[in-house]
Amino acid sequence: MKEMGNNKQMSTMLTVREVSRLLHIHSNTLRRWSDQGIIKAYRIGPRGDRRFKPEDIAVLLLQESKGLPKDEGESEPPESIDRYVMSR
């Protein structure tokens, strides 16, 4: 039974392609943001494919659209995603 719940959760996660299209950014940009910790990615499978939770994407968009500061524990990203997300 636990496995079924896990599969449901996995099916609600978004792929690199889906998130790239939602944010109107190149997939390599999304991968770089994931590597830099700007956006949380979850690695799945033997290849380590990235998956993203829709709620993480929503929080990111809300923070950027409202200009909210990042959590105190987070370091400032090297480049702002405003340039990519808000200009589209």
Image (cartoon, rainbow, N blue to C red):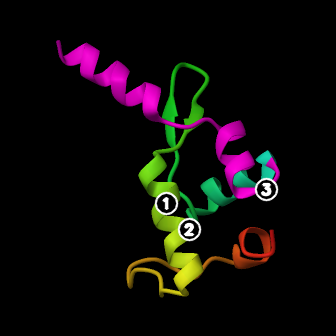
Whether label 2 touches label 1, CB < 8 Å: yes
Q: Against 20, is 61 above or below?
A: below
Magenta highlight: main SS? helix
Any magenta on residue 10?
Answer: yes
Q: Which mark is residue 58?
A: 1
Q: Residues within 10 Å of mark 1 (few under 14, many from 20)?
A: few
Q: Residues within 10 Å of mark 2 (few under 14, many from 20)?
A: some
Q: Where is residue 25, by image quadrant?
A: bottom right
Say which amino acid is labelled 2.
Answer: Leu
Which is more toward the observer, 39 or 59? Answer: 59
Any magenta on residue 7?
Answer: yes
Quarter of the rendering occupied by the N terminus: top left
Q: Please name the residue that numbered disc 2 is placed on.
A: 61
Q: Nearer the viewer, mark 1 or mark 3?
A: 1
Q: Earlier in the sequence, mark 1 or mark 3?
A: 3
Residue 5 place in picture, x, y as percent: 25, 22
Q: What residue appears at the point 71 percent right and 78 percent down from the top-left corner?
A: 82
Q: Against 32, is 85 above or below?
A: below
Q: Is residue 21 left or right of residue 42?
A: right
Q: Where is residue 47, by image quadrant?
A: top right
Q: Please name the residue that numbered disc 3 is placed on.
A: 25
Q: What residue appears at the point 46 percent right and 45 percent down from the top-left corner?
A: 53
Residue 30 place in picture, x, y as percent: 70, 53
- Label 1 to label 3: alpha-carbon separation: 15 Å
Say which amino acid is labelled 3.
Answer: Ile
Judged from the image, the secondary structure of the residue bearing numbered disc 2 is: helix
Q: Is residue 2 visible?
A: yes
